[in-house]
Amino acid sequence: MNDMQETEKGQMDLLERITDPKELRKLKPGQLPRLAEQVRAFMVDSVSKTGGHLASSLGAVELAIALHYVFDTPNDAIVWDVGHQAYAHKILTGRQHRMGTLRQYGGLSGFPKREESVYDSFGTGHSSTSISAALGMAVADTLAGRDNWHIAVIGDGALTGGMAVEALNHAGVYKDKVRLLIILNDNDHSISPSVGALSGHLGRLVSLGPVWKAREASKALLKGMPKVWNLAKRMEKQTVNFLSPDSSIFSTFDLNYFGPIDGHNIYSLVKFLRSIRSMNGPVVLHVRTQKGRGYLPAQEDPTLYHGVSPFDPVKGIEEKPADPARPTYTQVFSDWICDMAEADSSLYAITPAMREGSGLVEFEKRFPKRYRDVAIAEQHAVTYAAGLACAGIHPVVAIYSTFAQRAYDQILHDVAIQNLPVTFAIDRGGVVGSDGSTHHGIFDISYLRAIPNMTVMTPSDENECRLLLSTAFRMKSPAAVRYPRGRGPGVPVEKTLETVPVGRSRTLRQSGAQQKRVAILAFGSMAWRLKSVAEQLDATLIDMRFVKPLDEEAVVQAAVQHDLLVTAEEGVAAGGAGAAVLELLSQRDVPARTLCIGIPDQVVPHGDLPHLFADLGMDEASVLARIRERL
């Protein structure tokens, strides 16, 4: 039995006392390691019941404790990046007894959220934003005469995002004018330098208060002698870079760098942080941590335990074999891209750090030379694809819907305006559930249909997904196929690479009534979600397949032949597929009664899909009631 299990069995004496960081700061330093054990035990027990991002948060336990122990939070602000590292932070800031609601409908968010707690200074569902946000807060406080510290904890690969580098470049301008601490939480899933004796010694040496004060006094003296000052500055940078190559990027931006240090040695962490508190920023502290720390299964396979569904913490996650009869949409894409790559040697796959999530593990094994994970760099991924396309390669960019938002300008400027053959396989299109507002892929239809030269496809089931992916790839222009998270209705997938006519819908059900009252134009998942509604109303049900170009004749014919035209999409109603239908009817001067079903103009929270669809008025009962009311 490991230490964590022993702690779980024993009394959680220290953790029970911590109702907020003020109580934490009453503890003696010698009590902190035991508190860390108890936080981990509680975290594993809680997340095993709710699901969530486990491995990253297990690795940041000592760091969260040390930060709240040393700094005056919430006056001193912490920004966690990526926010799924922040479970220990939530536990220590008064939310311990609500952790059982984590990611549940009406419960705690899986990410920091400003409206949830005063200790959540900035919402961070997406990565690479912390340095920019913390720098903005630090500058604002300086302008207001406040002396608070602002800490950006950046890890899990977030430093690979271009926005983080832009922020580092900007932060260096401020020299000692702001109190900004950038903590690089290096857990082998971002930059991964070794902790050598020389670099460790350097970190211990320069972090000492007397050394720092002597250095600052020397700076003040030498700045009056520009030539000597510039020489000393160059020598300092060269010495730091020689002894600790990890610091080169930071010293290039004129940021004071310390580390790397052991992020699980809480005494060392507290000592370093206390020394830094006496300095002026911006300062970079490089901390080495281990994903999954303290829970052996997560340590051995941090990728498996990165994001988990509920599991038995004693047995660990028992992976269920894939069900060939009910593949997820991601698995449909995974099978398709391998088959298409076998048939067409021009195919090249790109993902911005979502190899597992986007279904490219098998592809990388089979076609390693035609695959690239570009890290958390969505903008680069798209323009890199554009460059490949210019040289005769046909790239497929596998990307989540919400992450594609971050590359909007590149999709428009670098791909679409030049009409390049880049295929976008957009996963997690629609409502995704427990990941919440930052991860719902509900804007892609609206923003993609506004882009010239772009074809937008919305498969309604698993087989349609494969057909439309093949159709998109065979086009000589930009094309996007957006499909939802998880499983579809269970339609068997035909293992062919056939295509469908571009802009052609298919009728799933024809009304048998002499007076045809309702036609439902369904986009994507709404085709099968509203099948029962169509049957109850004896309505015509059309799977539109394409948002752009629309099947214009099918739309006009449905409008003319029915009393009410209903559009339905798992995306925002504003500017979405329903809006495209209304625009077409207006252009054709076709009078028609219409009802557009889509996500209202609001932030959609996290929760289970049945609750969310009911709240949005998009579940079967709500749609049926809305149609009957309109009739």
Image: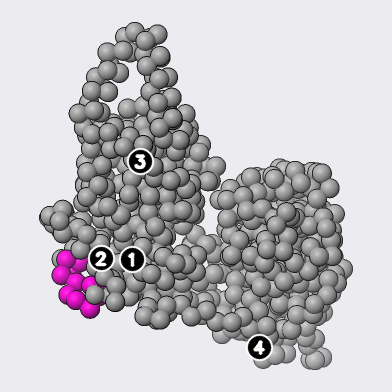
Identify which amino acid the numbered label 4 is placed on.
Answer: Ser
Q: Nearer the viewer, residue 456 or 335?
A: 335
C-alpha separation, residue under disc 3 versus residue under disc 1: 25 Å
CB atoms of marks 1 and 2 within 8 Å? yes
Return the residue at label 2: 37
Identify which amino acid the numbered label 1 is placed on.
Answer: Gly
CB atoms of marks 3 and 1 within 8 Å? no
C-alpha separation, residue under disc 2 versus residue under disc 3: 28 Å
The residue range painted magenta reads: 7-16
Q: Using a 10 Å C-alpha cutoff, classify the residue at mark 1 as few (fewer than 14 neighbours), some (14 to 19) or many (20 or more).
A: many
Q: Secondary structure at mark 1?
A: loop
Residue 182's quadrant in the figure? top left
Quarter in which the N terminus is drawn: bottom left
Q: Using a 10 Å C-alpha cutoff, classify the residue at mark 4 as few (fewer than 14 neighbours), some (14 to 19) or many (20 or more).
A: some
Using the rendered image of the protein, determine whether residue 113 is visible from the camera's viewpoint. Answer: no
* Residue 10 counted in the magenta span: yes
Identify which amino acid the numbered label 3 is placed on.
Answer: Ala
Going from the N terminus, do you reach mark 2 or mark 4 first? 2
On screen, 219 above or below 297?
above
